């Protein structure tokens, strides 16, 4: 077995930063896209780490501005776990470096860290997991809704529809929809017709749903439409990936907000010159 060491020291007189005393892997949630939604701990670790493993297709480049100028940046969008793991082991064990493995959203949700942690533990490489804000939380904030409204809905279900990754039969979408809770549907845009049909078995056709594309990015889109328009709207907007659906009675107050949002997010991605 391995142990964690959570002891840090501060360095630098102008800016206090967490600096890991031991070589270790830090699995860090980067949030949904807006760099301002990183946790303070994530920012401090990015500012201190020797090596950053960066899922560049899912995380904005601007987050790299927080890293040390001399940090080793390794892009992993096209790499498999079998290619990434030896890099982590080498930098921590052989080179005694601190390494941040940056994941989009929160590591506990659809980030494939289970196997990663198992293999790190097997290799006796110490690691720590730092949570991040998930897309469903950022989307609810943008929609200005509470997903647990007293007397209306008190349960949030985070799930996905079966696709290339199979969902256990006990968690089949239609059976989850029967609860009529606030249901947040990840990774399901490619199977939207199937998802809509299963949801309609239990939610009324006019139930408002939010279609949220690339939440927190400059090109984010949010549509609030009736459930029976879920698939049509997805196809009209040509959404295939990075789309979250929120189906909830709590959205009833947002029924009038069925226009397409193109928010200005100039404050999110500040250049290094500002």
Image (cartoon, rainbow, N blue to C red):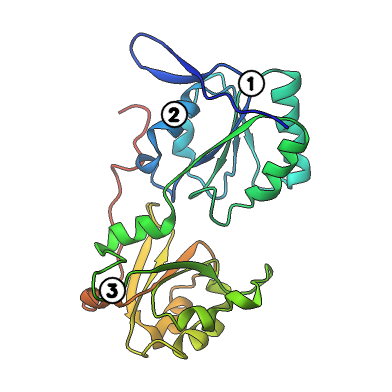
Residue 258 visible in the displayed image:
no
Quickly name the residue at label 1: 23
Residue 184 horizontal/vertical position (percent)? 44, 68
Q: Is residue 90 visible?
A: yes
Q: In the rendered image, which residue does mark 3 sit on?
A: 251
Compared to residue 9, the image places residue 178 above or below, namely below
Which SS class for mark 3? Answer: helix
Q: Label 2 near label 1: C-beta < 8 Å? A: no
Q: Residue at x 43, y 80 (%)?
A: 179
Q: In front of the other: label 1 or label 2?
A: 1
* SS under mark 2: helix
Image point (45%, 45%), residue name:
132
Closer to us: 7 or 73: 7
* Residue 171 position by quadrant: bottom right
**Mark 1: few/some/many CA within 10 Å (<14, 14-19, 20+):** many
Q: Name the quadrant containing residue 90.
A: top right
Question: Which residue is pictured at 42% across the width and 81% down the height?
Answer: 230
**Residue at 35 percent of width and 40 percent of height:** 36
Cα separation between marks 1 and 2: 20 Å
Distance Cα–Cα, label 3 vs label 1: 46 Å
- Residue corresponding to mark 2: 66
Quarter of the C terminus within the rendering: top left
Number of other residues with Cα within 10 Å of mark 2, as a class: few under 14, some 14 to 19, many 20 or more: some
Disc 1, SS? loop
> Position of 72 compared to 152: left or right?
right
- 219 shown above or below 204: above
Dot 3, crowdedness within 10 Å: few (<14), some or many (≥20)?
A: many
Image location of residue 91, percent across then percent down: 70, 24
Sequence-wise, the earlier of marks 2 and 3 is 2
Q: CA distance from mark 2 to mark 3?
A: 36 Å
Residue 223 lies in what quarter of the image? bottom left
């Amino acid at each position: 077995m391995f142990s964690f060491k959570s002891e840090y020291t501060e360095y630098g007189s102008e800016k206090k930063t967490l600096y890991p005393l031991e070589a270790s892997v830090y699995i860090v949630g980067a949030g949904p896209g807006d760099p301002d939604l990183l946790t303070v701990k994530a920012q401090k670790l990015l500012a201190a780490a020797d090596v950053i493993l960066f899922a560049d297709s899912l995380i904005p480049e601007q987050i790299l501005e927080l890293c040390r100028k001399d940090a080793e940046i390794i892009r992993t969008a096209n790499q498999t776990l079998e290619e990434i793991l030896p890099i982590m082991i080498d930098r921590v064990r052989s080179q005694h470096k601190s390494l941040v493995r940056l994941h989009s959203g929160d590591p506990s949700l659809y980030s494939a860290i289970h196997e990663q942690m198992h293999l790190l533990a097997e290799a006796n490489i110490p690691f720590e997991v730092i949570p991040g804000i998930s897309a469903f939380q950022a989307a609810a904030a943008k929609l200005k809704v509470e997903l647990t409204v007293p007397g209306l809905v008190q349960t949030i279900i985070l799930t996905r529809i079966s696709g290339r990754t199979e969902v256990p039969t006990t968690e089949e979408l239609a059976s989850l929809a029967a609860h009529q809770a606030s249901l947040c549907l990840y990774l399901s845009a490619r199977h939207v017709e199937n998802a809509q049909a299963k949801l309609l078995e239990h939610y009324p056709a006019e139930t408002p749903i939010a279609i949220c594309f690339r939440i927190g990015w400059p090109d984010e889109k949010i549509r609030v439409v009736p459930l029976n328009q879920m698939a049509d709207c997805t196809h009209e907007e040509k959404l295939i990936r990075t789309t979250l659906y929120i189906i909830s009675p709590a959205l009833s107050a947002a029924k009038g907000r069925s226009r397409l949002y193109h928010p200005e997010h100039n404050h999110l991605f500040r250049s290094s010159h500002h």
